[in-house]
Amino acid sequence: MYAKMIEEMDDNRFGWIAIIILIVGCLGGLTVGLGAIGSTLTLITVVLPTMLTLSLLLAVAPMRWIVASAIVSTTLDLLLMAYFLL
């Protein structure tokens, strides 16, 4: 199932790139704004996977790398956002 999803994403690469940029960029910015800027460690935890994902997009890396990086970045952002909101 994962391989089929990656194949479909590779066929529609430019549409998925726009979606990933929107989701990863906005979640990263919201997480920093909600409190990650208060500590250097949390800021690094947010910025490192976000910039890795965006750099992979810019480098036109294989979609499986981009998807894996986007999943890690989104998961960390959502976990930290939940922590800062509670």
Image (tube, rainbow, N blue to C red):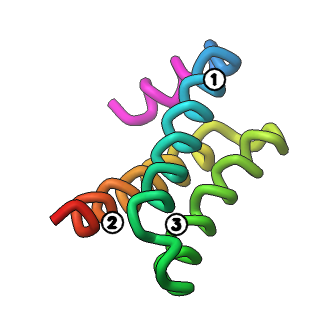
Q: Position of residue 1 (x, y in %)?
A: 33, 30
Residue at 84% from the left image edge and 44% from the top image edge: 59
- Inspect the image, locate mark 3, and give the three-letter code of the amino acid beneath it: Val
Three-letter amino acid code at the position of disc 2? Leu
Marked residue nearer the N-terminal end (3 or 2): 3
Looking at the picture, does residue 41 appear above or below residue 78? below
Instruction: Give the image location of residue 10, x and y in percent.
Output: 63, 23
Residue 62 rendering spot, x and y as whole percentages:
70, 41
Q: Residues within 10 Å of mark 3 (few under 14, many from 20)?
A: many
User: Contact (CB < 8 A) between labels 3 and 1?
Assistant: no
Instruction: Using residue 26 as the reference point, say whether residue 12 is left or right of it.
Output: right
Residue annotated with mark 3: 46
Magenta span covers which residues?
1-9
Q: Residue at x 62, y 68 (%)?
A: 48
Is residue 72 a member of the stretch shown in magenta?
no
Q: Dot 3: what SS? A: helix
Mark 1, residue position: 18
- Report the disc number at residue 30: none
CA distance for labels 3 and 1: 20 Å
Query: What is the C-alpha distance between the residues marked 3 and 2?
Result: 8 Å
Per the image, label 2 sits on a secondary structure element best described as helix
Q: Kindly identify which numbered label has been placed on residue 80.
A: 2
Residue 76 lies in what quarter of the image? Answer: bottom left
* Contact (Cβ within 8 Å) of mark 3 with mark 2: yes
* Type of amino acid at the residue the image marks with label 1: Ala
Q: Is residue 3 magenta?
A: yes
- Left or right, 29 with respect to 74, comes to right
Q: Main secondary structure of the magenta part?
A: helix
Relative vertical location of residue 29 with respect to residue 22 in this rendering, above or below = below
58 shown above or below 69: above
